[in-house]
């Protein structure tokens, strides 16, 4: 994301991130509310007409409450609350329990857009690792205070960070941003790659993954991306199904659990979940996400410079129509090229 920001202005970056996130997100909300919801409402013995009522817990509330990424309603009525293992464990029956992380992701995009707008990414890029270091410090504060989820001890230092997750995701994101900003200075070594992979495994097993492990895993993933055969670089090169797998994974898992597939064992359950989510991701990419991205250079996609040029053109056209400019005067006069200088042989 930071690499993308470096090749655009703040307006273009936000517009393109909006197109990448929101259309697919809104589509999965509609699928949950008007395809999955009605089917399982009736399978659980209710009349279809009652499903489309209004008020809290309704499919309409599910749509407008969640539309801006901040998930305020997970369930639609009581669907799946008593018919899936997750619901029977006392967790309710979320239609899509994975999408809660998107608001944190998009907030990080907005932070990057702010840094881009104030030219930090070009003229003061050292602030990016400083921000990452601040998130690391807050992460350590949370972990030492025993806060792994829920309320955050770091909120006493930074009130905005009212829970553990902004700190955790902020650290991950700005670690990646730092690697992007200083990509030309990151050493590339087989020994470092192997060591980073080993440290990542050790921290996963014995602790420390939420601090040191984030650093080593980030390096290890980038090392693999550069070291694996070229065949692996074709993954996602033309069609990016990753977001669709994320959006539809939970729904497919719950549908399979409702049918009792989870009792077949972990491996077949996970495999069929990936197959189902992958199929939905293909449809989501080609019908929604890819189509939305075709608008990336439209409207705000032209950026501040494009909007300024269009505004000047409109102003000059209006002045011509009012007679303030000669009709033959060009709208956007171009500077004459400099005369070439003679150089010695």
Image (cartoon, rainbow, N blue to C red):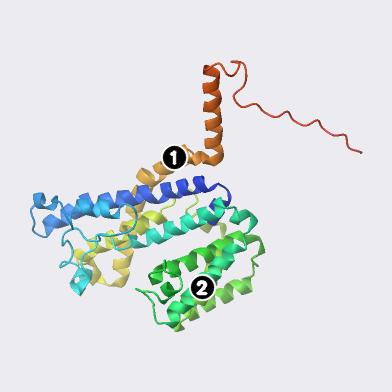
> Which residue does the numbered mark 2 point to in the structure image?
136
Q: Residues within 10 Å of mark 2 (few under 14, many from 20)?
A: many
Looking at the image, tell me whether mark 2 or mark 1 is earlier in sequence order. 2
> Which residue does the numbered mark 1 point to in the structure image?
295
Q: Quadrant of the C terminus?
A: top right
Quarter of the image where one finds residue 224:
bottom right
Q: Residues within 10 Å of mark 1 (few under 14, many from 20)?
A: some
SS state under label 1: loop
Q: Residue at x 38, y 45 (%)?
A: 286
Taking 251 as reference, is 188 left or right?
A: right
Q: Residue at x 24, y 69 (%)?
A: 262
Count of marks overlaid on the render: 2
Q: Which x, y percent locates residue 141?
A: 46, 78
**Does 299 sit above or below residue 30?**
above
Quarter of the image where one finds residue 320:
top right
Residue lying furthest right in this view? 345
């Amino acid at each position: 994301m930071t690499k993308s920001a470096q090749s655009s202005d703040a307006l273009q970056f936000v517009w393109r991130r909006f197109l990448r996130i929101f259309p697919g997100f809104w589509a999965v909300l509609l699928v949950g509310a008007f395809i999955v919801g009605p089917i399982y409402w009736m399978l659980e013995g209710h009349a279809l007409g009652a499903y489309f009522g209004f008020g809290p817990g309704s499919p309409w509330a599910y749509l407008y409450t969640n539309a801006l990424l901040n998930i305020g309603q997970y369930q639609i009525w009581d669907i799946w609350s008593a018919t899936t293992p997750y619901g029977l464990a006392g967790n309710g029956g979320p239609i899509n329990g994975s999408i809660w992380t998107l608001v944190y992701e998009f907030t990080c995009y907005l932070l990057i857009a702010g840094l881009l707008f104030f030219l930090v990414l070009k003229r003061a890029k050292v602030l990016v690792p400083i921000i990452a270091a601040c998130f690391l410090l807050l992460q350590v504060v949370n972990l030492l205070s025993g806060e792994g989820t829920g309320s955050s001890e770091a909120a006493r230092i930074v009130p905005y960070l009212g829970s553990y997750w902004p700190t955790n995701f902020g650290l991950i994101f700005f670690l990646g941003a730092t690697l992007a900003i200083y990509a030309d200075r990151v050493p590339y070594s087989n020994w470092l790659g192997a060591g980073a992979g080993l440290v990542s495994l050790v921290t996963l097993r014995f602790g420390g993954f939420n601090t040191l492990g984030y650093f080593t895993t980030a390096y290890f993933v980038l090392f693999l991306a550069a070291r694996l055969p070229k065949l692996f670089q074709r993954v996602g090169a033309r069609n990016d199904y990753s977001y669709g797998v994320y959006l539809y994974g939970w729904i497919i898992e719950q549908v399979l659990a409702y049918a009792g597939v989870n009792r077949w064992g972990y491996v077949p359950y996970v495999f069929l979940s990936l197959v189902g989510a992958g199929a939905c991701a293909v449809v989501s990419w080609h019908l929604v996400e890819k189509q939305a991205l075709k608008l990336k250079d439209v409207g705000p996609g032209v950026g501040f410079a494009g909007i300024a040029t269009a505004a000047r053109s409109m102003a000059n056209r209006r002045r011509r129509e009012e007679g303030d400019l000669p009709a033959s005067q060009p709208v956007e006069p171009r500077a004459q090229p400099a005369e070439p200088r003679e150089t010695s042989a």
